[in-house]
């Protein structure tokens, strides 16, 4: 006996089905539109998403992945960036375009 067939279609991001209802694809696409990514990046995200969906990643592993990406991006909140650069909050916003992730605005300063 095989799996029962269903006509239900999951919403997907990077080709990976989203099961949790609290994800909004339009919000995820604001982070980095898929058209700006290379084919290698899209394929890598797809494989990563599949391995997460298959339960191969623990929460601790995912946290480490986020921290690793944050280190490479040199990501900071706007107030922290302003403090480090000794400029005002508005000066920080004007100097670097903020990127919103999980509802929080960050400055990516990896030049």
Image (cartoon, grey):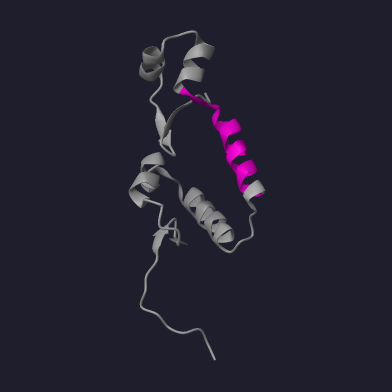
Could you tell me what secondary structure mostly forms the magenta stretch? helix
Residue furthest left as drawn: 26
Q: Position of residue 74 (x, y in %)?
A: 56, 27
Residue furthest bottom as drawn: 1
Q: Position of residue 28 (x, y in %)?
A: 40, 46
Residue at x 37%, y 70% (from the top left corner): 9
Residue 96, compared with residue 88, is above or below; it is below
Residue 24, compared with residue 71, is above or below; it is below
Residue 25, compared with residue 71, is above or below; it is below
Along the line of sight, which residue is nearer the eye, 51 or 60? 60
In the picture, measured across the screen, residue 102 lies left or right of residue 64, that is left
Q: Quadrant of residue 88?
A: top left
Residue at x 45%, y 9% (from the top left corner): 87
Residue at x 66%, y 47% (from the top left corner): 60
Q: Which residues are magenta?
A: 61-77
Residue 46, compared with residue 26, is above or below; it is below
Is 64 contained in the magenta span?
yes
């Amino acid at each position: 006996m095989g799996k029962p067939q269903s006509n239900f279609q999951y919403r997907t991001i990077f080709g990976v089905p989203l099961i949790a209802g609290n994800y909004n694809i339009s919000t995820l696409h604001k982070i980095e539109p898929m058209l700006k990514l290379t084919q290698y990046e899209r394929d890598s995200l797809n494989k990563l998403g599949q391995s997460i969906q298959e339960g191969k990643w623990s929460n601790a592993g995912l946290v480490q992945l986020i921290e690793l990406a944050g280190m490479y991006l040199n990501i900071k909140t706007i107030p922290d960036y302003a403090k480090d650069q000794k400029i005002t909050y508005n000066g920080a916003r004007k100097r670097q375009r903020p990127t919103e992730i999980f509802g929080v605005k960050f400055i990516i300063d990896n030049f």
